[in-house]
Image (cartoon, rainbow, N blue to C red):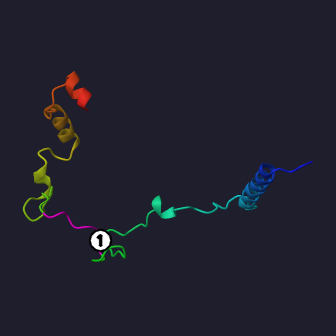
């Protein structure tokens, strides 16, 4: 039987592929194997208000952007003055009855949403 160039190439590729597949098998079933880029989906956990080696100022919590408007400022307003309804079941029910959406319920609004 005469071996052609394509037959030899195919045989070599099949052997290389087979050796890669067989070398990837392990006896330990609990081993997760190798991870290609583990930091892409499992980021480092940083302690809030702690230090971080990632940033130059070593703060884990970032400061607000200059010019942003704070939602709560403890120096000027107490927390409860930002919300007109009390934090009780009666306050929840009153808010549900009195607060209405400023958007009209029609097809144009639903389509944009």
Q: Which residues are magenta?
A: 59-66
Q: Position of residue 82 (x, y in %)?
A: 12, 51
Q: Position of residue 13 (x, y in %)?
A: 74, 54
**In the figure, 18 relative to 75: above or below?**
above
State the residue at coordinates (64%, 61%): 33
The residue beneath circle 1 is 49
State the residue at coordinates (72%, 59%): 20
Who is closer to the viewer here, 14 or 18? 14
State the residue at coordinates (63%, 60%): 32
Residue pushed farthest right? 1
Q: Is residue 40 left or right of residue 60?
A: right
Q: Position of residue 59 (x, y in %)?
A: 29, 74
Q: Is residue 107 left or right of residue 35?
A: left
Who is closer to the viewer here, 92 or 49? 49
State the residue at coordinates (33%, 76%): 51
Magenta stretch: dominant secondary structure: loop
- The reply to whether the magenta stretch includes residue 87 is no
Residue pushed farthest left? 76
């Amino acid at each position: 039987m005469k071996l052609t160039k394509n037959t030899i190439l195919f045989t070599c590729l099949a052997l290389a592929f087979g050796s890669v597949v067989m070398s990837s098998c392990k006896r330990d079933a609990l081993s997760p194997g190798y991870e290609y880029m583990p930091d892409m989906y499992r980021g480092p956990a940083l302690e809030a208000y702690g230090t971080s080696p990632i940033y130059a100022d070593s703060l884990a919590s970032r400061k607000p952007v200059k010019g942003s408007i704070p939602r709560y400022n403890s120096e000027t307003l107490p927390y409860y003055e930002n919300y007109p309804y009390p934090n009780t079941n009666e306050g929840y029910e009153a808010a549900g009855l009195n607060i209405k959406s400023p958007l009209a319920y029609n097809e144009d609004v639903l389509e944009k949403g």
